[in-house]
Amino acid sequence: MEDKIFTKLQQKFFYIPLVIGWVLVVLACSLIFYITYEKTMTKVQSNLLKASDAPYFQSDNFLYIFDKNGSLTVSLLENAYTDSEIEEITVFIKAETDNKFTIKSGKHFMYIKSSSVDDGITTVKYVIIEYTDDMETLTALAITLIVLGFASLLGIFLFCYFYSKSTIAPVKASFIQQQELIANASHELKTPLTIVRTNLDLITSDPDSTVKDNEKWLNSTVEQVNRMNTMILDMLELSRIDAGKASRYMRVPVVLNDCLQGTLLSFEAPCYEKNITLEFIAREKATVLASNEEIEKLSTILLDNAIKYTPDNGKITVKIQRVKQRRAVQLSFTNTGAGIPEEHLERIFDRFYKVDPSHKETHNSFGLGLSIAKSLVVSLKGSIKCESKLGEYTSFIIELPLSLTSGVSTGNKKNN
């Protein structure tokens, strides 16, 4: 069903521009030829009128004079035509069916007729001009326009074909992504909802039980409700960022070093529990245009992700360094561990995507954190990528543009 909808939509994007383009090309070529033809004929007629008033013959004209007896006298400045051609021309002149004619040799002529009476004798004069060269030019123009027209029609066809495909592609991708989002969200909500329902069934199965008796099931229910609440909040965060509302906080020049130090302090306890070494390297201060809330959210997601996948006695390194040639700052979060297979790196930022689905329950993760991180980085006009080597490390590298104004931000949550 969806394929038929997208096929019809693509056809609209294809046929409508195609028909409009073809009509415009045909009209343009026809108009060019028509204007050129009219100008050429006007020029020929103008020259013919000038020649008819001249007291002498033009080089490209010849004159027929009929006397009172109807005898024909042909006057030529040059012997430009053969006897057979002159005879053929005479036939057209006598017929007087049209003031333009073409003889067998392919030469084109136009004539003008005038008469005068002198001493009772009527003299009829025909002045004829040849415009074969002009017609050849018009023919060449017509052929050129036809060739260019067909080439343009083909070009428009190819353009509309690829344009329709490229136009429909993001719409189709967005639709598929939306379907996947709904399917994944439904799948992720199914497990906690099932657990909640089971816990409630167990609680209601014994009407005489106390809260203390059901403490285990109640705690499990609260935990699952919190999980669902976290996922819903993450999805709302993503939809808010996608809608271009990421800057709900006031963005001011923020010293990245100070903001990160505060976030790192809150992760010392989880690192201590797993005996993870947390190292912070920043040789110089870097200021970016953001808000403390956005930087804290971004660093929290990446630090939380690093701790989840860093084994006991491992190491996490957070590093800040300036990229002077691009006037940017590079922020990296590197952790030792199993690493990420190369085939997963391209999809690591996809929503609900997990390299190892078995971590779902253990780490209470829905696969939305990295998607939020990427959306935040993009909203800050930066870039993010993941590098990894199996059995050694995983590194998330962020590049943000430096703020034009240096200094510590004010009006945000905190500066440490």
Image (cartoon, rainbow, N blue to C red):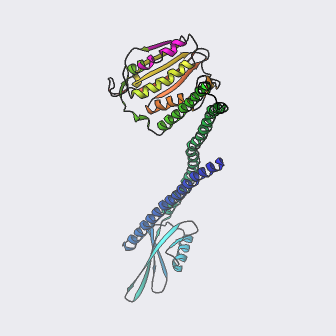
Residue 35: x and y in percent read: 45, 63
Residue at image coords 37%, 88%: 119
Number of labels in the image equals 0
Q: Residue furthest front?
A: 208
Provide residue 8's location: percent of width, then percent of height: 62, 52
Q: Is residue 347 visible?
A: no
Against 58, is 361 above or below? above
Question: In which quarter of the view is residue 266 placed?
Answer: top left
Residue 343 position (above or below residue 87): above
Question: Relative to 306, is 214 on the left or the right?
Answer: right
Residue 235 spot, x, y in % from top left: 53, 35
Picture quadrant of residue 252: top left
Q: Which residues are the magenta region?
A: 262-280
Whether residue 51 appears in this view of the structure is yes
Q: Is residue 277 magenta?
A: yes
In the rendered view, tell whether residue 145 sits above or below residue 324: below
Question: Is 243 above or below relative to 352?
Answer: below
Q: Quadrant of the C terminus?
A: top left
Frontmost residue, 34 versus 80: 34
Q: Is residue 90 left or right of residue 114?
A: right
